[in-house]
């Protein structure tokens, strides 16, 4: 129950990204025709660093994560772009190649740990099973290693708890077990898809603290899918904001929070009440996020935007690179927004 | 200071649920003590926020206040009248004055009824309230009040977004002109950009209609924004109760302090400059709560006394900060 420091910011990553998504497009067949769910999304993940993908429901953030993992099944399909990892494009890779990478070198932790765990095997058995099939370990060695992994994610009395079943675990402990399983094969990239959304705030703090410590120990790159601006501010290094299937802004977290260059990001930052100050009324973005995506002519955010001009409704703004390097915004008025002139 | 009569008072409210089945034959099933002796008062036009983690009993408390759940013991009074003791016409009259808005507008609205039908329903139950002829005008007024499009009255709930559905839920709660609305996690199912709209709506309605709210949420930032006073619940009991400023700026109960420090701040500048106290483990089960102080198993200040003697919520809850702790945190000297 120690006092811990909220982790200080890390130095910017150097060198090449460990994983890159380039111009990813994903479509889903629906009763109303083909819907683009992810459009031209590009992301870079660096070793030892966390990229947050921030978005509301329907923004395409989870579909992007699943595409990286190779978990897009019909009626969805990847229609364009690349997922570059270890010198290979995983979109084009054979099923066998894909299997060797996904789950092994790229692992994922989902929001709902209860449905991701098998209810009829003990938690220890499930982790050990992974080590036996993927690492060829013997029964005894795998069981011992599973206990080690559970201790590493700070599950108390790991040896005893390894014999227990998922329903005997609390929400926080189940999420730890999922993290242990994800780490079992030493992944180079961990995707955390809303890892703490279902958890209480005191447990959320424990899990985020754990993930950051594990990242420091292993040097794994992390993609953190979330809608929580507080979690982003405290744990991520870089940020991509998604809206209606596209990245509308990206950059270093401190930079984006201090000087947003897209009206949507700015609106989100203004609309949340703060624990450390009292505001009179909250700024509210009018309208709702689009539920069914379609290829609109202009900017998808224009109908909710407080600074939209005619051009925004007719021509879609491209994601334009800004300074410092890595900073980008998809807004016709990004200069004015960035400098607070509108 | 002369205190106005509270519009709502809750006295030693308790709700135990019998276990579904006996663990061992011949032994009684363990009772879940969901709410265990909660007391507070609510003044007209005031917002009392209730925060706490899952399983702390805040939703059961909400359901007892509006009469959806019968207390095991304790009293809920609306302007002095025991809500659970009255029957018939008087009970209906009291129900009308205390309404509820639920978390999930996706499941709390009947999918087979249009908005117009949904808003007419309260008047069909409370027939004496409004002549049938005046219903359309009142429904139009309600729709206007919560910011829904009057042209959408004949649509079904699925045709609306989450935020608009919550507006329908609010309009329904307002239909019978209540004095108190119990809001049970009213924005937590909504997207971030929509939460602010709905929070602002609640505040505008309070100003315009003089409503009092019991605002139940797990999001401490939203509660700080909406509430005049705040109660912090842990395992069925109030750990702390006081003005918003006192509770947030100088928490006296260690749990309040830990809860506040766990909230991630949306400000990257605070990284490396803010400390937090990480609690260990999850809240214990309300089936078998710890003896003495229920928080002691996770508390860094706990002593033997905490295991043996239950700390009572001390202090006058209407004007001062009350807390249930043997070892309260000091008030920092300014």
Image (cartoon, rainbow, N blue to C red):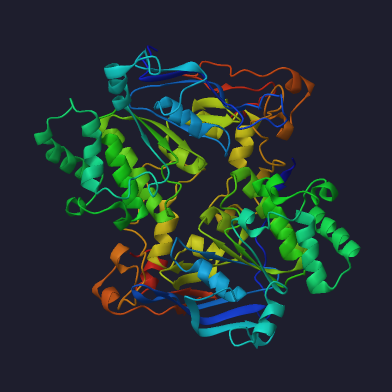
Residue A311, horizontal then vertical, whole percent: 27, 76
The answer to whether residue A240 of the structure is visible from this angle is no
Q: Nearer the viewer, residue B174 or B277?
A: B174
Q: Quadrant of residue A281?
A: top left
Residue A263 at least partly seen: yes
Q: Quadrant of the N terminus of chain B?
A: top left
- Judging depth in this view, the residue of B83 and B314 nearest the camera is B83
Q: Is residue B279 left or right of residue A135?
A: left
Q: Position of residue B173 (x, y in %)?
A: 30, 36
Q: In the rendered image, which quarter contains the C terminus of chain B? A: top right
Q: Quadrant of residue A308?
A: bottom left
Q: Residue furthest front?
A: B25
Depth order, front residue of B221/B7: B7
User: In the figure, residue A147 lies in which quadrant?
Assistant: bottom right
Apparent side of residue A163 relative to residue B238 in the rendered image (left or right): right
Looking at the picture, tell me which residue is in the foreground, B267 or A294: A294
Q: Is residue A278 above or below residue A268?
A: above
């Amino acid at each position: 129950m120690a006092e811990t420091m909220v982790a200080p910011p890390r130095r910017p990553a150097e060198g090449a990204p460990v994983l890159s998504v380039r111009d990813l497009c994903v479509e889903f067949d629906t009763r109303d025709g083909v819907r683009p769910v992810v459009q031209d999304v590009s992301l870079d993940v660096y070793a030892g660093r966390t990229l947050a993908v921030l978005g509301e429901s329907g923004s395409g953030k989870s579909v992007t994560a699943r595409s990286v993992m190779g978990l897009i099944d019909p009626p969805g399909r990847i229609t364009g772009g690349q997922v570059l990892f270890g010198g290979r494009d995983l979109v084009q890779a054979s099923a066998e190649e894909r299997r060797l990478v996904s789950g092994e070198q790229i692992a994922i932790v989902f929001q709902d740990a209860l449905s991701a765990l098998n209810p009829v095997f003990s938690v220890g058995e499930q982790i050990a099973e992974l080590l036996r099939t993927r690492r060829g370990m013997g029964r005894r060695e795998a069981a011992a290693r599973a206990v080690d992994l559970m201790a590493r994610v700070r599950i108390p009395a790991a040896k005893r708890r390894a014999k227990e079943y998922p329903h005997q675990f609390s929400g926080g402990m189940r999420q730890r077990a999922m993290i242990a399983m994800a780490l079992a094969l030493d992944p180079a990239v961990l995707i955390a898809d809303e890892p703490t959304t279902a958890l209480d705030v005191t447990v959320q703090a424990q899990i985020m603290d754990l993930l950051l410590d594990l990242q420091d120990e292993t040097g794994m790159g992390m993609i953190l899918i979330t809608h929580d601006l507080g979690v982003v501010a405290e744990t991520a290094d870089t940020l991509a904001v998604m809206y209606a299937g596209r990245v509308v802004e990206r950059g270093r977290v401190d930079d984006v929070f201090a000087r947003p260059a897209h009206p949507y990001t700015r609106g989100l930052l203004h609309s949340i009440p703060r624990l450390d100050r009292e505001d009179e009324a909250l700024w509210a973005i009018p309208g709702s996020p689009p539920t069914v995506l379609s290829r609109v002519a202009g900017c998808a955010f224009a109908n909710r935007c407080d600074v939209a001009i005619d051009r925004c409704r007719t021509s879609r703004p491209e994601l334009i690179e800004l300074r410092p390097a890595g900073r980008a915004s998809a807004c016709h008025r990004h200069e004015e927004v960035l400098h607070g002139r509108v | 200071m002369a205190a106005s009569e509270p519009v709502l008072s809750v006295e030693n409210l308790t709700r135990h649920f019998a276990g579904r089945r006996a663990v061992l034959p011949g032994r009684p099933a363990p009772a879940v003590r969901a709410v265990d002796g909660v007391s507070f008062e609510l003044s007209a036009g005031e917002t009392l926020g209730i925060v706490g983690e899952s399983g702390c009993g805040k939703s059961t408390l909400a359901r007892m206040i509006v009469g959806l759940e019968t207390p095991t013991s304790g009293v809920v009074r609306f302007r002095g009248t025991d809500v659970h003791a009255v029957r018939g016409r008087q009970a209906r009259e009291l129900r009308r004055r205390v309404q509820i808005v639920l978390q999930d507008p996706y499941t709390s609205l009947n999918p087979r009824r249009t908005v117009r039908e949904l808003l007419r329903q309260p008047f069909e139950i409370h027939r004496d309230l409004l002549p049938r002829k005046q219903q359309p005008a009142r429904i139009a007024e309600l729709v206007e009040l919560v910011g829904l499009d009057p042209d959408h009255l004949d649509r079904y709930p699925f045709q609306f977004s989450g935020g608009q559905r919550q507006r329908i839920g609010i309009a329904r709660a307002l239909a019978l002109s209540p004095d108190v609305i119990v809001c049970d996690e009213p924005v937590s199912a909504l997207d971030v950009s929509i939460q602010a709209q709905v929070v602002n709506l609640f505040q505008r309605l309070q100003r315009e209609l003089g409503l009092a709210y019991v605002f139940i949420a797990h999001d401490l930032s939203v509660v700080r924004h909406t509430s005049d006073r705040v109660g912090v619940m842990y395992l069925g009991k109030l750990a702390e109760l006081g003005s918003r400023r006192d509770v947030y700026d100088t928490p006296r109960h260690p749990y309040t302090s830990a809860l506040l420090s766990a909230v991630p701040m949306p400000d990257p500048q605070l990284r490396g400059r803010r400390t937090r106290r990480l609690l260990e483990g999850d809240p214990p089960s309300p089936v078998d709560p710890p003896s003495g102080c229920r928080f002691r198993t996770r508390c860094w200040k706990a002593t033997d006394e905490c295991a043996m003697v239950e700390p009572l919520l001390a202090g006058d809850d209407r004007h001062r900060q009350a807390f249930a702790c043997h070892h309260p945190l000091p008030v920092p000297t300014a």
